[in-house]
Image: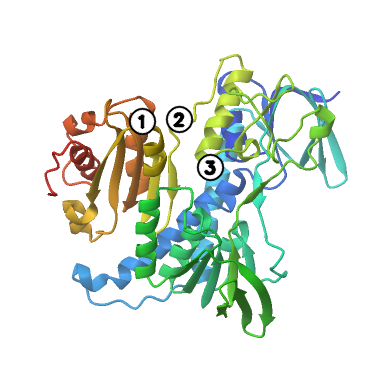
Amino acid sequence: MPDKYDIIFLGGGPAGYQGAIRAAQLGARAAVIEQRFVGGVCLNQGCIPTKTVRASAETGRTMRRAKEYGFAPVEVLPDMVAIIARKQRVVNMLRNSIEQLFRARSIDLIEGHGMLVGAGRIEVQKNDDVTALETTNVVICTGSRPSQLSVFPKNERIFLADDMLNISYLPKHLLVVGGGVVGVEMAAIFRELGSQITLVEVLDRILPHEDTEMSSQLLSILKRRKIKVHCGVAVETVTETSEGFTVRLSNSEELSPDTILQAVGRRFNTEGIGLNHMGISLDNGHIPVNENLLTAVPNVYAAGDVVGGWLLAHVAFAEGICAAGHAMGKGSRMDYRAVPRCVFSIPEYASVGLSEEDAQALYPVKIGRFPFKSHGMAHATGELEGMVKIIAHDKTDEILGAHIIGAHGADLIAEITLALQAHIPARVFMKTIHTHPTFSEAVQETALALHGEAIHIL
């Protein structure tokens, strides 16, 4: 007889592993089917690896600035093998932690390729063995993979985003194709490690879906860091050479990078998992779901990247937990009103809610800005680049959106995200005492600026 579960998660990434833990907390017999590594792209190739290597890049940057902080100049020589080895140690430790949580909560981790074969039935293939499973509920959370452009040949020095941080050497000249989140992050990180960087974006600006003013400000910072950026430009031809590549751009410029990163979006992993057996149709490549993460088929849920929308690990966390809760009778539903977005460039860019231009198209707005260069803690730490920007409804004072460029921006956005989610007006920030000296005071100063009462700017 096949093993029988209350709920099975097809995929062990952010949605799958957190959803399984939540289901187990609610008393379910849960299993996770994972073909590669638990934790998915986020833990193994994306979020955690990127931030771990970024920490090394930031350490190198601080060492190069030793004289600013009163120390003798320090020679900084990145050891990419050691940096990548540290990254892998962090990944392994966190992956082991998830597996320990599974064991503690009696969650079965089943290795292999899972396929839906009928109502409540899944087959898992590992090598030549096939295991049949039965379940009351299933959550499809198979994630996504990097897109790639046909103009690029197959070459060990041409990387996709998920493979970039397994690199064994420091590129002399890295061409980053794509000015979205991944492209900007990698450009900033490898520049601080010492690579020459050229970034090419086919649209008219980097981070094209974010606030125009903040995108422009981050671009200026990247250029000050000597990152060459071409917007509104495409790659036309790529020729392999003995030393790397000759790349011709649509503006007729030629580049000679030794390494190339394709950061041009992601594709949903919906093939080969049996959607046709279940009668599940795709919508522009993703699996359509309702607010409870239910597909059109009873007891079949989907969560994470495969449902489209925000392709963010923290959204996948919430979706996996929501799907588990609803399957276990809790009536859970998703609310995407306040989704923070973070670009872990150097410095960081974080945002939540609407851009200035989108807000102005819908509401009467007021805008407050506070530059880090007017901030005491920024001066104390030597991190003067960036600013906080809050957009609020001119009549109700409700926060519509916020954007932060600067040190700890990804942490600072959480306070504003809570306010946006809870409909807390901006004036509450004015009356909330913030610890001094901290970067969080910049948020309070921005709220004061919204009302013409900022203390440290005119």
Which numbered disc covers residue 337?
Answer: 2
Q: Residue at x 15, y 39 (%)?
A: 452
Mark 1 Cα within 10 Å, few/some/many (few <14, many 20+)? many
Disc 3/disc 1 C-alpha distance (Å): 19 Å
User: Residue 278, how many percent across, how many down?
Assistant: 81, 28
Q: Position of residue 301 (x, y in %)?
A: 67, 26
On the question of residue 249 being in view, the answer is: yes
The residue at 43%/74% (across/down) is: 194
Q: Residue furthest bottom?
A: 242
Q: Amino acid at mark 3?
A: Leu
Q: Nearer the viewer, residue 284 or 357?
A: 357
Give the CA distance from mark 3 to mark 2. Answer: 14 Å
Is disc 2 surrounded by few (<14), some (14 to 19) or many (20+) residues within 10 Å? few
Along the viewing direction, whichever of 344 and 285 lies nearer the viewer: 285
* First reached walking from the N terminus: tag 3 or tag 1: 3
**Display colour scheme:** rainbow
Q: Secondary structure at mark 1?
A: helix
Q: Please report whichever mark, 3 or 2, sits nearer to the chain's N-terminal start.
A: 3
Q: Badges 1 and 2: C-beta atoms under 8 Å apart?
A: yes
Looking at the rendered image, the disc whose residue lies closer to the viewer, 3 or 2, is 2
Tell me, for residue 420, which label it has, or none: 1
Q: Which residue is mark 3?
A: 312
Q: Residue at x 53, y 72 (%)?
A: 174
In the picture, measured across the screen, residue 218 lies left or right of residue 200, that is left
Structural crowding at the residue carrying mark 3, measured as other residues with C-alpha within 10 Å and reported as few (<14), some (14–19) or many (≥20): some
- Callout 2 amino acid: Arg
The relative height of residue 291 versus residue 66 in the rendered view (above or below) is: above
When the figure is inspected, residue 40 is found, relative to residue 6, above or below; the finding is below
Q: CA distance from mark 1 to mark 2?
A: 8 Å
